[in-house]
């Protein structure tokens, strides 16, 4: 197994990775903030709804704790596919969050 190295722009505001999310109603390319301290990948719920991964397909409701310690409501949903950093994952779980608040 060969280990890959990825470099982020140190002058950039945030380390961003390109990803492809696949659901029952299609797929979408997104930019995700790479956060090694985050327990689960989070995406705005409307993006997930667009590919057919809405709250009704969710596994369960969850709360996402931020730096304030308060939990924001979210839902956990499986994706048909996730491609990021050259790797493919089937059935990866992702959180649908309302980032407009």
Image (cartoon, helix red, strand yellow):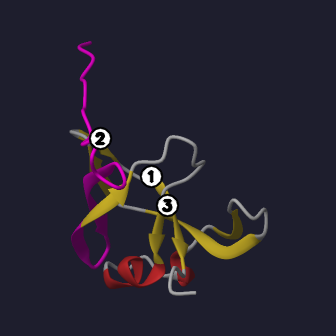
Q: Do the residues bearing badges 3 and 1 touch, measured as CB atoms within 8 Å?
A: yes
Q: Do the residues bearing badges 1 and 2 touch, measured as CB atoms within 8 Å?
A: no
Q: Using a 10 Å C-alpha cutoff, classify the residue at mark 3 as few (fewer than 14 neighbours), some (14 to 19) or many (20 or more).
A: many
Magenta-colored span: 1-29
Q: In the rendered image, which residue does mark 2 sit on?
A: 10
Q: Using a 10 Å C-alpha cutoff, classify the residue at mark 2 as few (fewer than 14 neighbours), some (14 to 19) or many (20 or more).
A: few
Q: In the rendered image, which residue does mark 1 sit on?
A: 92
Residue at coordinates 61% horizontally, 67% vertically from top-left?
Answer: 59
Residue 30 in percent (x, y) is at 26, 66
Residue 38 in percent (x, y) is at 57, 49
Verify whether residue 77 appears in magenta.
no
Nearer to us of marks 3 and 1 is 3
Residue 32 in percent (x, y) is at 35, 58
Q: In the rendered image, which residue does mark 3 sit on?
A: 94
**Callout 1 secondary element:** loop
Residue at coordinates 23% horizontally, 71% vertically from top-left?
Answer: 28
Residue 11 in percent (x, y) is at 27, 46
Q: In this rendering, is residue 77 above or below 8? A: below
């Amino acid at each position: 197994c060969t280990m890959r190295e990825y470099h982020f722009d140190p002058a950039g505001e945030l380390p961003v990775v390109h990803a492809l999310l696949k659901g029952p109603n299609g797929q979408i390319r997104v930019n995700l903030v790479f956060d090694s301290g985050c327990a689960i990948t989070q995406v705005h719920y409307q993006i997930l709804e667009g590919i057919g991964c809405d709250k009704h397909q969710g596994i369960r409701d969850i709360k996402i704790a931020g730096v304030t310690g308060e939990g924001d409501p979210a839902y956990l949903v499986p994706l048909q596919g996730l491609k990021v950093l050259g790797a493919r994952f089937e059935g990866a779980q992702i959180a649908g969050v309302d980032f407009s608040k």
